[in-house]
Image (cartoon, rainbow, N blue to C red):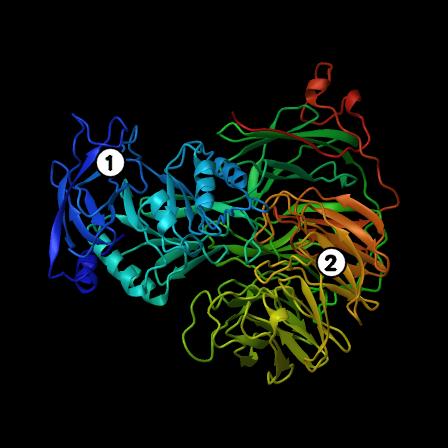
Amino acid sequence: MRVGLIASVIVCALAVPQVASAKVVHGLVYDDQNDDGQPSAGEPGVGGAVVALGVRGFVVTDASGQFDIEVPDALASGIAWVRVPDGFRPGPAWQRWDGTADIDLALHRLDAPIRGPLTFVVGADTHIPATQELITGADLANAATMATALETPPAFFTVLGDITQGNREAEFALVDQALAGIGVPWIPVPGNHDWYDGGAAWFAHYGPDNYSFDIGDVHFVVWNMAMSEDDIRAYLGAELSHVPSTMTVVALTHAPPSNGVTDALRDLGVDYVLTGHAHSNRVVDRDGLIELNTEPMLMGGLDFTPAGYRVITLDGGRLSSYHRTTLDEPMLTIVGPARGQCTPAKGAELVVAAELDGGTANLTARVDCATPIAMRSAGGMSWVADLPALSGGPHAITVEATTPSGTSATATTTIEVCTPAAAPPKGPDWVQLGGDPDHAGAREHEIVPPLVTRWTAAVGGHVITASPAIARDKVYVAVTDLGDGNSGGVVALDLVTGALKWRVATAKPLRGGLVVVLGTVIAPQIDGVVLGLDAETGAVRWRDELTPRRGAMSPEAGALFGAPVAESGDVFVGHQRTLAAIAGDVGTPLWVTEPVPDGMDSQSAAAVAVGSGIAVGTFNRALGGVIAWDRDTGKRLWSYLGAETVAINASPIISDDSIYIVSGADEVTSLDHAGQVRWRTKLDPDGFDWGNATIGTPAFASGILVVPTLYRDLVALDAATGVELWRRAAVPGPLHTTHYRGAGEAGFAASPVITGDLVWAVDTSGKLTAFDLASGATAWTTDLGVPVLAGLAVSGDWLIAASYDGSVRALVPTKRERPPVEPPTCAEVVAPAGCCDASGTPIGALVLTLGVAGVIWRRRR
């Protein structure tokens, strides 16, 4: 809520000064009841409405809707707009003023005012291009239609700037066409990509670039980030001076506000600010002012969050938010029990991945056509249900999902109740990204396919790029919250059974991975707080906050996306302003340095690599390059900065004589341990500095470097020369994971692993494949059914995959695979009386060999 009198005090200091020579412009604000855009007989004026001309004026209409604005004589034209009062259709209500005529501002009354909880949908950075090649207007139309498909239509839909890619007239027309049919008010917010022409195209399509509206007891104010900081503060001070102190104030803009603007927002009583621009998903508490930064709606983010949006609700001044992932069609997949997995007769859990549209889904499951079982949301895209006691043999599972808008989907599979083979032995622990501090991602022991799922488990939230860890007979997984952004967590599962050992909630999401060292799980929060958790219980052993040695640090500068790394009991973790070596068991800092003193935003997701006595890292998209420090003292040894060091997010690899780095432009560079270039290889001619084509850390063994890219391919290079040995293509998946690319894009986000002579890689569709390391020949493949973005982990014959939906599975070798069989639906089965009860006695027609899941979905009319 706003603090009384603060706005009026600040506006005195910030208001536009009076001019010596001025003229008066007269106007009317009216209720356009016949929607013809001009005042008609009998249409009443609207009293008490606030009117402005551009960012100046701010007068209030009289009881009849009349107003007069004093403007400088030198002002020849402008855009007049009215703050839309409660009860009218929100959005820019405006008229272009030609310098002479009176102004008539039309308002359009809603069928009924919005009361009670206020819900709206927030997207960002759609970047609709004129070319219509990689991202299209059809993508926006589909995403917006699904996003606004709520039980009660949202109050409005907004895109927080960079609506277009190049500020072209044709691009704005494509946006208008895409959003013409969504049926809810559209709130445009200007971004830098929409402003290359100084606003000419924007003014023609949307009118004011700064405007406001009221819904119930909430005031929304839009501002253009292109203004100077002084002009922003002056506009907000003047605009908010007319807002009662009892109202909740929500600001919408493109870029995260500067420190100066943040201070003004806080002083003016703004409660929440909604932003885009950073191409990331994050919630930041700016000393009481809450910022929700939302990732691009149609393409992968710079932080590698897949395309998505928020559904926000305000109730009594309190904001809550849930996240939805942008999909081209509804998604419903039965994750576990998986094909070939032995299901226990009692205590089995059904795990399903589901996301249909912006609404809240309802899921039910049936076993052998019995009474439906209600499923419950488990976080992320995961839904779970406890299966009833089942007899031995196969059983049919049918899952049905519906949303209030009428979107529905059905998935079917068969499971088998049986006794699994003895658990295979575990091998060396995989305690961190790439298994070891050099990130080589390799083990000598070969996991021999075919594999079968041993267990599946839901972990309570999305797993994005944080690889799981294996240690102490447990699997440790970092989960994140993409909605309210005020929670995350670490989950420990039993390696052999998948049973939950412990779960610890964290105050902020975890975007980097985990490392397990000296009985401690190191968990880095996105806000730069590093936790040391007891590996057996999850209890907090120690806490360290990464703060710069000098100067203040913005939340953007201190965001922590990279995983921690451990070597010989010491942990290396940091962001662009602070890198620390910490004693893993007690959290005592051993040394601290500042990698990029001038870093403000655009942080890297790469972890530090440690080997041969050096620690090597990169921390900012453009600044600092690749830096090497003495592993023991933190002394800077050298740095290398070049075009090939821009947008490095894949973690470096250190071998006996080389360091390998991969840039966002899809270029691989080999350096020696002194930082001198040995070779460079461009993997894709379309790679460019903003492409962000890589996030998965390569794997290295037997002189071969295997590089995952989001530009479709997994590429193997001769590590000595950079010569390409082979490449294999991914399968397009349901997510939009690649920066500046939309639907249907294939790629590998997850770090591969090498076991013996096999490379294990999983693409963003969930297709897991074992390739021959030397030739790239396919040894075996399976479809996990859900997208995987996080790297794999291995220990002995155990392979662990954590998927984006929020599920984890363990796969182990099996002697034979059961052939897939399409199961019948309940409608196809004529059952004798009493055969289909929840006790699970299978009917004869359902005694089948194990089948794969099938999905049917229907979009609402």
Going by the image, does 500 lie left or right of 49? Answer: right
Residue 572 location (% of width, % of height): 61, 74
Tag 2 secondary structure? loop
Identity, as a three-letter code, of the amino acid under mark 1:
Ala
Say if mark 2 contacts mark 1, CB within 8 Å. no
Residue 323 location (% of width, % of height): 50, 46
In this rendering, the answer to whether 128 lies above or below 334 is below
- Residue 428 visible in image: no
- Between residue 450 and residue 63, name the one nearer to us: 63
Task: Please tell me which residue is depicted at 11% across the width and 37% down the height of the picture.
Answer: 63
Of badges 2 and 1, the one in the foreground is 1
In this rendering, the answer to whether 716 lies above or below 339 is below
- Residue 805 visible in image: yes
- Between residue 581 and residue 114, name the one nearer to us: 114
Residue 259 location (% of width, % of height): 36, 67
Residue 684 location (% of width, % of height): 69, 58
Residues under labels 2 and 1: Cα distance? 59 Å
In this rendering, the answer to whether 426 lies above or below 180 is below
Going by the image, does 778 lie left or right of 184? Answer: right
Sort mark 2 into few (<14), some (14-19) or many (20+) by Cα contacts within 10 Å.
many
* Residue 106 circle label: 1
* Residue 752 circle label: 2
